[in-house]
């Protein structure tokens, strides 16, 4: 679809960016030492740190990805909310206080605190870099997605803008400015998501959800008796769907045949000369409109056209008993043209409120599809406590008690936000705002339907969300390079000033890599991508962290080898799996497993145990030395 | 080795008891989470049964897991603070 430029949105966006840069200048003047650059001097208040945790964590994946996924596949998207939040339990009960007690600037410090092992320093730093880059990709994809409607710019321009601003933020003031940027944006995100949810409830559910800022266009329905001037050109059967190509006044459109009716499908046709037609017309004509509504509404046992204002539980109850129009993507060739058709399917609303539309765990499920589901839920549960940019936030507070309290503030703030994602996603699914080409835009487009002002604020916050998360990831990466690799692994004995300089240069380099990857991965669901980052983090880092804390026989070699096995197996499964193979090589992949954690985490854990048991002499020497 | 904490931390005599409490609470939550995943895999249809007001099991359990995390976090903090106040009293004095 094509988006109109909103000058109010641009003004609010520019204000946000300038405010963030101003904050960075202010803190930059105060950031002189490595302690201040990498750990904000360990002086952040626990409440501020808790909301900053939320700011760090509620990334593009949460706001754009989860809401988008819920809008398209219902409850399966909400599973990410549940899994992401559950991961904080591991962080709170097992990791928070020991991390604070053992580390200084990076999570490598904590892993290596009793060994002083070059192998741990190298592998943990590499793991930090890989996990951070995996996590950076979806943030950058999200940035590109946002600037299209916000500023009317191309996807790649958004990626470059975010990259440039973040490099500036991190290179000026490091963790201190990053913390306050995250605190502000985390707070604003929760406040305005609540506002958006209130709009949804006040608006209620309607068969024709005309909103203040946008009229809903109902897809056409033709009957055999009234074809409205359309002529049938050709027919095509794909799976269980009968597609009919029709022509009117030189414009070709696709319909699905159902009895004596023809329902309009949304289509994107790529012609043999590379041109694109949206519902048979150039993009600018706006024929590829927004969709997604209820087609039958049942309230209190009666069929109605509109519910009027509803409460949160009533909202879910009405959807549960009504029917929803969903769109399924079909890709096929029509002569020399490639067609992507989005075909309307009416389903009972209750199917949107249980798992199964994306993850095949019920009807048509296979052992592999169930394994994928279990593996994903495991990665989400175990991934949070192993994300480097989350772990380093424990070093910014003064004490272990503060580390614990800030985690609880984070859980409350993040949990509340994740409850809202269900309402925002379902609100988008039923308000006629979905852009079928890009699910990531569902929540901002829902805001746009309620008013340009709300859209402008929500988009600017979403953009700030990405800035904050990317900043945190780049601080973690620059710490891994400057502190773990250069200072400790290479033993360069950097002065405080030199370490800060090295950190800033590293931040700029990682920023450039993130920009390139953000452009390459355009179009993928950001939450799905983050699922991979969690799987790599859980496999590479968590076995090492947990066993170090709870198993006395853990050795340095055990930790290092477990990190290597975790990274290699998780990456190996992802790269040879169906999604990457399809996106980059046009093949089905070597196997059907998209979520690697169940295998890679187990392998890493097993490796740590076996290698540690085989190298117990190292620990004996360590004790003797002390 | 120059990689201890970024700020000076006092000795925490309560660390062991807090760790034990943390492990216990982690196990409880993991079981509740595991049952949720198991229902999805073994009997996903039961997720649509209405069990609370007009809400189905999937929504109730999902919201329940989120609220349980918050409640357990608060209980854990309350217990830990109590243990710290008892066991680190001498240091304060």
Image (spheres, coloured by chain):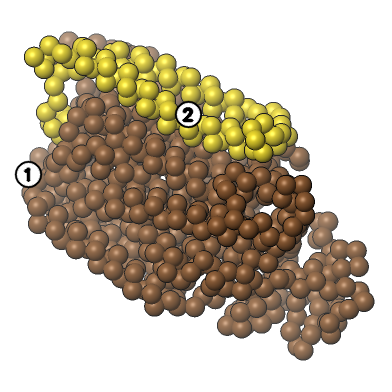
Chain colours: A brown, B yellow
Q: Position of residue A3 (x, y in %)?
A: 51, 75
Q: Is residue B45 visible?
A: yes
Quarter of the image containing the N terminus of chain A? bottom right
For the question of whether residue A581 can be seen, the reply is: no
The structure residue drawn at horizontal position 12% and vertical position 11%, both measured from the top left corner, is B90
**Residue A45 point in image, percent of width and height:** 20, 39
Label 2 crowd bin: few (<14), some (14–19), many (20+), radius 10 Å: some
Residue pushed farthest bottom?
Answer: A249
Whether residue B61 sits left or right of residue B29 in the image: it is right
Q: Which mark is residue B68?
A: 2
Q: In this picture, is A74 found above or below A551?
A: below
Q: Is residue A172 shown left or right of residue A353?
A: left
* Mark 1 and mark 2: Cα distance apart in space: 47 Å
- Of labels 1 and 2, the one closer to you: 2
For the residue pair A460 and A576, the one nearer the viewer reads as A460
Position of A166 relative to A80 (above/below): below
SS category of the residue bearing label 2: helix
Q: Is residue A480 above or below residue A5?
A: above
Mark linked to residue A516: none
Provide the chain ID for the residue under circle 2.
Answer: B
Between A611 and A403, which is closer to the camera in this rendering? Answer: A403
Secondary element under disc 1, as helix, strand or loop, is: loop
On the image, numbered disc 1 is attached to which residue? Answer: A495
Mark 1, chain letter? Answer: A
For image coordinates 55% across by 57% down, the residue present is A202
Q: Quadrant of residue A359?
A: top right
């Amino acid at each position: 679809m094509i988006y109109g430029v909103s000058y109010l949105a641009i003004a609010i966006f520019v204000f946000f960016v300038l405010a963030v840069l101003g904050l960075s200048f202010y803190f930059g003047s105060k950031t002189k030492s490595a302690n201040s650059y990498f750990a904000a001097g360990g002086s952040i208040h626990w409440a501020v740190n808790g909301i900053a945790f939320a700011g760090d964590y509620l990334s593009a994946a949460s706001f754009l990805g989860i809401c988008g996924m819920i809008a398209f596949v219902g409850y399966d998207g909400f599973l990410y909310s549940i899994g992401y939040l559950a991961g904080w339990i591991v962080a709170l009960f097992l990791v928070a206080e020991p991390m604070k007690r053992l580390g200084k600037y990076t999570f490598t410090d904590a892993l290596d605190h009793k060994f002083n092992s070059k192998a741990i320093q190298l592998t943990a730093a590499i793991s930090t870099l890989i996990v951070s880059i995996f996590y950076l990709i979806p943030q950058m994809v999200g940035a590109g997605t946002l600037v299209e409607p916000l500023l009317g710019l191309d996807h790649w321009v958004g990626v470059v803008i975010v990259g440039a601003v973040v490099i500036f933020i991190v290179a000026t003031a490091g963790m201190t400015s990053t913390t306050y940027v995250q605190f502000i944006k985390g707070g604003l995100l929760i406040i305005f998501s609540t506002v958006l949810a209130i709009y949804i409830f006040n608006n209620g559910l309607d068969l024709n959800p005309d909103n203040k800022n946008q009229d809903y266009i109902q897809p056409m329905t033709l009957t055999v008796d009234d074809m409205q001037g359309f002529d049938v050109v050709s027919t095509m059967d794909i799976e269980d769907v009968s597609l009919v190509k029709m022509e009117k006044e030189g414009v070709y459109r696709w319909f699905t045949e159902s009895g004596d009716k023809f329902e309009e499908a949304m289509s994107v046709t790529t012609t043999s000369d590379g041109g694109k037609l949206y519902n048979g017309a150039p993009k600018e004509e706006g024929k590829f409109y927004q969709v997604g509504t209820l087609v039958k509404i049942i309230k209190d046992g009666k069929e109605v056209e509109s519910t009027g204002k509803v409460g949160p539980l009533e909202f879910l109850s009405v959807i549960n008993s009504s029917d929803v129009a969903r769109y399924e993507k079909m890709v096929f060739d029509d002569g020399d043209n490639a067609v992507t058709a989005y075909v309307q399917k009416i389903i009972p609303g209750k199917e949107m409120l249980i798992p199964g539309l994306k993850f095949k765990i019920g009807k048509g499920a296979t052992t592999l599809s169930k394994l994928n589901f279990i593996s994903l839920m495991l990665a989400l549960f175990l991934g949070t406590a192993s994300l480097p940019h989350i772990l380093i936030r424990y070093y910014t507070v003064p004490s272990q008690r503060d580390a614990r309290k800030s985690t609880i503030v984070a859980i409350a703030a993040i949990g509340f936000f994740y409850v809202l994602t269900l309402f925002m996603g379902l609100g988008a699914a039923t308000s006629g705002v979905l852009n079928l080409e890009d699910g990531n835009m569902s929540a901002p487009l829902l805001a746009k339907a309620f008013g340009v002002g709300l859209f402008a604020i929500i988009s600017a916050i979403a953009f700030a969300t990405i800035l904050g998360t990317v900043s945190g990831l780049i601080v973690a990466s620059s710490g891994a390079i400057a502190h773990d690799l250069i200072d400790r692994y290479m033993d360069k004995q950097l002065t405080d000033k030199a370490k800060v300089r090295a950190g800033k240069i590293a931040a700029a380099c990682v920023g450039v890599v993130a920009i390139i990857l953000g452009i390459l991965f355009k179009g993928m669901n950001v939450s799905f991508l983050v699922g991979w980052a969690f799987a790599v983090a859980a496999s590479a880092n968590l076995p090492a962290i947990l066993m170090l804390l709870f198993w006395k026989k853990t050795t340095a070699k055990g930790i290092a080898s477990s990190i290597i096995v975790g990274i290699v197996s998780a990456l190996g499964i992802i790269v040879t799996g169906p999604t990457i193979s399809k996106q980059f090589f046009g093949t089905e992949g070597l196997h059907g497993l998209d979520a690697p954690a169940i295998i890679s985490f187990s392998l890493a854990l097993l490796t740590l145990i076996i290698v540690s048991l085989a190298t117990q002499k190292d620990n004996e020497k360590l004790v003797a030395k002390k | 080795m120059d990689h201890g904490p970024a700020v000076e931390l006092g000795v925490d005599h309560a660390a062991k008891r807090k760790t034990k409490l943390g492990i216990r609470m982690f196990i409880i939550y993991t079981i509740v989470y595991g049952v949720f995943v198991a229902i999805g895999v073994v009997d996903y249809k039961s997720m649509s049964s209405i069990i609370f007001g007009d809400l189905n099991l999937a929504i109730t359990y999902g919201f329940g897991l989120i609220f349980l995390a918050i409640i357990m976090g608060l209980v854990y903090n309350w217990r830990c603070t109590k243990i710290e106040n008892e066991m680190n009293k001498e240091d304060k004095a």
